[in-house]
Amino acid sequence: MATAIDCSVQRGRTADAAGRAAESIVAADYDRRGRPVIGQRWRGLSGEIDLIARDGDGIVFIEVKKARDHARAAAALSARQMRRLCGAAAEFLETQPKGQLTEARFDVALVDGTGRIDIIENAFGA
């Protein structure tokens, strides 16, 4: 008989696998559009960035949100999480030749239960 802890661990594993699958779908989409993914699950002191892509001389930081539908996925991004992402992005930019002067933007990629992607470019600036 499964315990509550076993069920919780299994749900966590399932969510992690779904998140990784969504990130792979989004990474393939960016690659197809000529924006190669150069980092996946990059971790800095401030937090983790799901995907990092190159767009010409610029960098695109991509937060992937997966849920049953795009509205639920979008609702999962909090102001606190955006602050952490900005901090991690600043850390990443320090590794680039132009540092903080590197052109950068934040995209949010929403993935629904069918694997359909909706990308909101420059989502933090919108």
Image (cartoon, grey):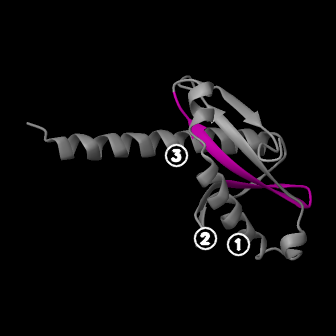
Alpha carbons under labels 3 and 2: distance apart: 19 Å
Most common secondary structure along the magenta stretch:
strand
Residue 88: where, in percent of width, then height?
66, 66
Residue at horizontal 76 percent and vertical 43 percent from the top = 30
Badge 1 amino acid: Glu
**Residue range of the region highlighted in magenta in the rendering:** 51-67
Task: Report whether residue 74 is seen.
Answer: yes
Residue at horizontal 75 percent and vertical 45 percent from the top = 107
> Residue at label 3?
20
Residue at horizontal 53 percent and vertical 40 percent from the top = 21
Alpha carbons under labels 1 and 3: distance apart: 23 Å
Is disc 3 placed on a helix, strand or loop?
Answer: helix
> Residue at label 1?
91
First of labels 1, 2 by sequence position: 2
Q: Which of 101 and 36 is in front in this view?
A: 101
User: Is 79 drawn above or below residue 74 in the view shown?
Assistant: below
Q: Nearer the viewer, residue 46 or 41?
A: 46
> Residue at label 2?
44
Q: In which quarter of the image is residue 70?
A: top right
